[in-house]
Image (cartoon, rainbow, N blue to C red):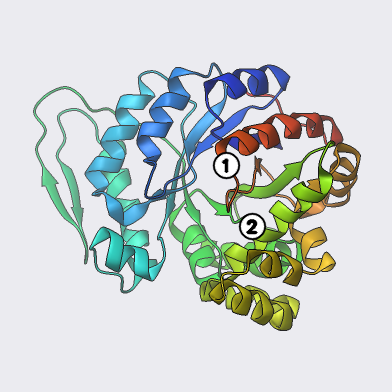
Amino acid sequence: MRFGMPWPGPEVAREAEDAGVNAFCASEFADHDAYITLAEIVANTREALVGPAIAYAFARTPYAHATALRQLHGAAPGRLFLGLGSAAFRINRDWLGVPPERPVARIAETVAAVRAWLHAENGEKVRHSGEFYAIDADVRAPVLGRLDIPVLLAAFNSGMARTAGRVADGVIGHGLFTRSWWNEVVRPAVVEGTGGDAASAAPCLEHGWIITAVDDTAPERAIADARRMIAFYLTVRTYDPFVAHHGWESPVEQLRAAFRAGDTDAMAKAVTDEMLTEIAVCGTTAEARATLAARADALPRDVGYFAPPTYLVGRRRRAAYARSSLALLEALPTTPAP
């Protein structure tokens, strides 16, 4: 597999690429745009695989997703992927002002409509007719030509994983993913979506985030940051099937109560040692290497992103965590960039 990281900025990225990191991803939130970040990544990397992981699928039209990728392809041919996420119900309704209903069906059609633009040849109309999008574009300028850029979906629960298997080239796993969630929920659902069985199904790309906080000078703080990140994610009820799957209802009730009370220390303390070990890679370099080696079969097959905690962690400490994670590259064999 390859190891990558969410974009840490040009300076850290140069060190990372020299050290053997060969994938970078751009995320999205209220203060940063996935494609603007991706343009910075393309301009400041040499050979690494790059793409959004993820871009909000419904924040843009299929045309806008595809056009951004088509322009970036000119500077990074063969290096791009597109990761799309449906976003939470409230983000779609309250932030983006788009219909929040039926996100699984909507994102499946979004993939098809984006591909209609990416696969368009010069001289041909770009056409897609569906429930959510109707495209009949006659682009007379010679600016098209087929681009086979892999499309991956952020797939947490089984419904989205089945959809990824059916319509996309792969999945992007959440930082919460554990060995059993990959093996017992996500991968079987992806295979089901392909219409095959585990033995005959075509390989599906797997990317995934790995919550990573390494600090040899302050390992307790790194562990606390990882606990807070896990706790913050688990305040969202979308992940209740994951919680039930692991039997973690009691600590999650505690951390949600602490979150409502604004007690971030209690949130972190509610995350059990089992949860921390199953989800995160943290502590000293030696501890993190041992954890990573023990979790070798719990990682995404193709690309794993060492993701520093972001909840109540400033940019300087996130950059330090990114640099510290470079010492983990030797813990597992990596695949060089093509």
Task: Assess disc 2: are there few (<14), some (14-19) or many (≥20) residues with their C-alpha within 10 Å of its C-alpha.
Answer: many
Q: Residue at x 50, y 71 (%)?
A: 159
Vertical order, 61 against 78 (above or below): below
In the image, 329 versus 253, the foreground residue is: 253
Q: For mark 2, give the secondary structure.
A: helix
Q: Position of residue 146 (x, y in %)?
A: 32, 31
Q: Disc 1 marks which amino acid?
A: Gly
Q: Is residue 202 above or below residue 322?
A: below
On the image, which quarter does residue 243 sit in?
Answer: bottom right
Q: Earlier in the sequence, mark 1 or mark 2?
A: 2
When asked about the image quadrant of residue 117, the answer is: top left
The quarter of the picture where the C terminus appears is top right
- The answer to whether mark 1 and mark 2 are in CB contact below 8 A is no
What residue is shown with label 2? 229
| Residue type of the residue flagged with mark 2 | Met
Of residue 196 and residue 218, the one placed in the foreground of this image is 218
Measured as percent of width and height from the top left, residue 167 is found at 43, 57
Judge left or right: residue 268 versus residue 189.
right
**What is the quadrant of the N terminus in the image?**
top right
Tell which tag, 1 or 2, sits nearer the viewer.
Answer: 1
Residue 65 is situated, as x and y percent measured from the top left of the image, at 30, 42
Residue 194 visible? The answer is yes
Element type at mark 1: loop
Quarter where residue 217 is shown: top right
Could you say which is closer to the camera, residue 1 or residue 263?
Answer: 263
Picture residue at 56% right of the left edge, 51% below the top: 172
Residue depicted at 62% across the width and 69% down the height: 263
* Residue 196 visible from this viewpoint: no
As drawn, 48 above or below 59: above
Q: Which residue is mark 1?
A: 314
For image coordinates 38% across by 44% down, the residue present is: 31
